[in-house]
Amino acid sequence: MTLSTHEDLILDLKNVNVKFKVEDDTLHILRDVSLSLPRGSFLCVVGESGCGKSVTAQAIVQLLPDNGQISSGDILFSTENEVVELNTLEKFGKQMRDIRGAKIGMIFQDTLSSLNPAHKVGRQVAESLLQHMDISKDEARTRVIELFRKLGIPDPERRYEAYPHEFSGGMRQRVMIAIATVCEPDLVIADEPTTALDVTIQAQIMTLLKDLQKTAGKSFILITHNMALVSEVADHVAVMYLGRVVEYGAVNEVLRDPRHPYTQALMASVPTLDANKDVELQTVDGQTPSPAEVTIGCEFAGRCPYVIAACKEKTIEMTQISTSHEVRCIRLDANGKLPVLVGGANNE
Amino acid sequence: MSKKNQDQQSTTRIFISNFLHNPSGVIGLAIISVMILTSIFAVQISGVAPDYIDPINSRLGPSWSHLFGTDQLGRDMFSRILSGGRQSIYIGVLASFMANLIGTVLGATAGYLGGKIDTVVMRISELVMTFPQLILVLIFVSLLGQGINNVIIVFALTGWMTTFRLVRGEFFSLREEAFVEADRAFGFSKPRIIFRHLLPNTMSPIVVAFTVNIAIFIIAEAGLSFLGLGVPVTTPTWGNLLTAAQNPVVVNEYWWLWVFPALAIAIFVLGVNFVGDGLRDVLDPRHKSLITKNKWKTMVLSRLRRKK
């Protein structure tokens, strides 16, 4: 869709729909997801649990669970000299496997279970290298140790020979980052990489990722539900709700001046240290509806204080409110502002 | 590089030291080693060839010149039992290895891939298992003919199911692990994920199954040979030596002809099971809590208690 004024896009998702077959039902998990990622930028995908953040990542690397399938849409990934349509490649074919790991790196949330307990960590990192590049084992070892040192793993020669359980959570996440980046991929997808870590380690890991983006020019997609993290690292942010991108734009515009009622509610519910203790923390009313429910119109309508009849009539299209900000809401006026609510919620 | 070797050694050294601190493992290993060595040097130890016929001295009871007595043809039983171990142990180890190989490869593939392949292999294993094993073995032996290598093939073909089910079960839980998902995301191929990444995680049950199968196959060989269907009678194996006990006269009058081969089988199988126990304790962290400080005492006590 828009925002693609930037010519050099590394990843371009066009109206991607993903459906899951669960017993007899077909669940529509991703609805017309369009995202474009300029080369060298840092995109954060936020949203509450079950909104399709992780499925988006899985769809990009073609690792959806067996019952999931991209039903329509295009995923364009540009390498140095060509544009590959990822969704047309065979899931476990040679071409797709060459892209996974080598061109697109993945960082996972649970570091202990994401590393193979039976292999030494060094070998696991080197294996990724040996799989995708034509180098000798000794060379791979040297490069891995060098990368360990760069990623702040102390005593890398000795650590190379250690097993995952001998590492702390933060160190394991560094190892995961090493595996994801050892082949110098252009794009790194990090699926909640810091959720299992404590805050100080979180900060270290995020600084590390940000450094990689700045110095190595890599593009990042960070999936998270931590809004504070988003404001620190992201260039662009996409807010997802029930499989749809509801707001998308440059981070300072979306976070400072959220336009979609859902983004506003999400931002209002972020706790801050200097908040008045007597004021209750705001929450988003209601619950995320199940994707099994067929909704017509805006997915957020059931929980939205600004809802009007027209919201539930047809699919809402994205509205461009600036060159780098778009919102999926029909209640915005010509200036891109939501109407002022009279007497609190006019729900129903 | 030297550093790497050092560290590799240290992992192995820890494993060896753990195993050496495991009483049942050490006893088992000692029993097995002694029996393997004596069977290799059978002739040197007994001083008589196992098939040296001496009709004048037939059916002599145990004495200093013939430790375990002599058989109907005057052959020295001590020498025959020692060299019989060669074939029996060879059959047990090789058959167990092959059965485990078949079971592991099929179990790993079926467990990881699931779906149709899994269903097909599972049905085959059920088919083989529901068929009475003895009859199955008889069919195979009559098809292939007698002989040591045929016995091994028959055992491997009829005995892979336990390992198969074990490995398949392990893979069912392992394939859901996050690191498998990570492996896929790094672009590794399916065979690589199955055999390089997941298999090392199932090594401990496989090793234990290997030792258990050795014991089972040695006993099975004895049973088969006792029926005259295993290894040709001309080759001494523990099972073939036991065949003598088919004759009630032998059972009553010449006890040394069957007691000693039976003892040899029992002791060796016991040793193998001890090693299996020990390996399980060392390889499987979940069992480690069972070993307390006073290992030897605990072991003796628990074994006594178990017998009651």
Image (cartoon, coloured by chain):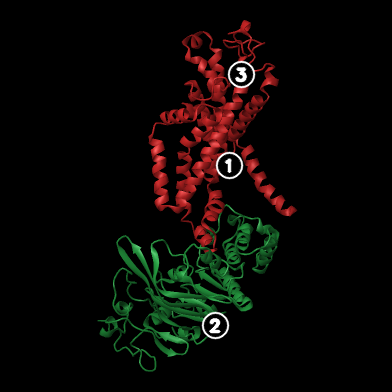
Check disc 1 and report the residue beneath it: B282
Q: Colour of chain B?
A: red
What kind of element bears circle 3?
helix
Check disc 3 and report the residue beneath it: B80
Q: Earlier in the sequence, mark 1 or mark 3?
A: 3
Q: Chain of mark 1?
A: B
Check disc 2 and report the residue beneath it: A8
Q: Chain of mark 3?
A: B
Q: Work out which residue is located at the far bottom of the displayed protein and give it.
A: A334
Question: Up-down: is B12 above or below B136?
Answer: below
In which quadrant is the N terminus of chain A drawn? bottom left
Residue drawn at 52 percent across, 68 percent down: A193
Q: Colour of chain A?
A: green
State the separation of the CA atoms marked 3 and 2: 82 Å
Amino acid type, label 3: Arg
Place residue A233 in its image quadrant.
Answer: bottom right
Q: Is residue A52 left or right of residue B24?
A: left
Q: Does any portion of residue A155 appear in the rendered image?
A: no
Amino acid type, label 1: Val
State the separation of the CA atoms marked 1 and 3: 36 Å
Instruction: Answer few, some or many: residues within 10 Å of disc 3's Cα (few below 14, many 20 plus, some between 14 and 19).
Output: many
In which quadrant is the C terminus of chain A drawn? bottom left
